[in-house]
Image (spheres, helix red, strand yellow):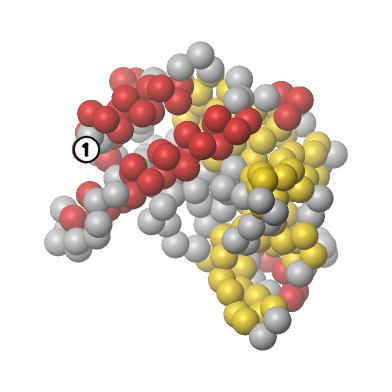
Amino acid sequence: MTAGAGISGGRGISVAHGVSIAGVTLIADLSGAFFWESERLLIVSDLHLEKGSSYATRGVLLPPYDTVATLARLAAVVARHDPCCVIALGDSFHDRKAHERLAPADRQAVAALQARRDWIWIAGNHDPALPRDIGGVVASEVAVGGIVFRHEPTGAAGEIAGHLHPKARVTTRGRTMERRCFASDGMRAVMPAFGAYTGGLSIRDAAFQKIFRTPGLMAHVLGDNRMHAIAASRCY
């Protein structure tokens, strides 16, 4: 594996490295977030808050800690970069009524994250009609400079999207690992899911081939201590 140039998190941990999208260099954070430093803009995707409680309503019992874990990780990356604005790229809530199941403490945590900064919720396929009482503003997509942020990827140049939950499976030093990743060919990107209970789709899946029609697709893999840039052709 080749590690990208990173930002040190101490004790040998590199929490981020640079990824260029349509001429704009973003910091790919080890948490699975993007940070656009010059715009002080933080981007996360597919939080899927209250997925555990959604499954519980259907009789599938999961430990009910996914929202707490996801918001704690989000608080850590917000503290690390101190953005002026946060864009959540859709499927922030696992279903249309997930926001109603938020515990009071989790609502307070969301409000604390939104304090003193702009917050934009992009509507996703899981949460197409977000209510006004969760703070921030709701949009179908947002353009900043030459970059467009939306939930479902179209393959357009200058696009950053989510929805597909990319992951990469690679073998290194005789060990196979499967991790979340940023998928990018330098002109567009699909972000990894940020939520604690979210699964993933292989970067080699046909869904990515429809979006990335040019050579050079890379998996920017979230490792244990640093990011790794790996050609998608080396993944399986």
Considering every residue shown, the one lying at the far top of the view is 116
Going by the image, does 228 lie left or right of 206? right
Considering every residue shown, the one lying at the far bottom of the view is 174
Quadrant of the image containing the N terminus: bottom right
Q: Residue at x 68, y 65 (%)?
A: 209
Q: How many marks?
A: 1
Q: Position of residue 179 (x, y in %)?
A: 57, 65
Q: Position of residue 183 (x, y in %)?
A: 67, 57
Going by the image, does 152 lie left or right of 100? right
Q: Amino acid at mark 1?
A: Arg
Going by the image, does 51 lie left or right of 196? left
Write down the residue under mark 1.
101
Res 188 seen here: no
Mark 1: few, some, or many residues within 10 Å (few <14, many ≥20)?
Answer: few
Residue 164 lies, with reference to residue 96, above or below; the image says below
Q: Residue at x 38, y 46 (%)?
A: 69
Q: Position of residue 31 (x, y in %)?
A: 57, 47
Q: Residue at x 29, y 49 (%)?
A: 65
Q: Residue at x 71, y 24 (%)?
A: 39
Question: Which quadrant of the structure image shows residue 143?
Answer: top right
Q: Position of residue 89 (x, y in %)?
A: 52, 39
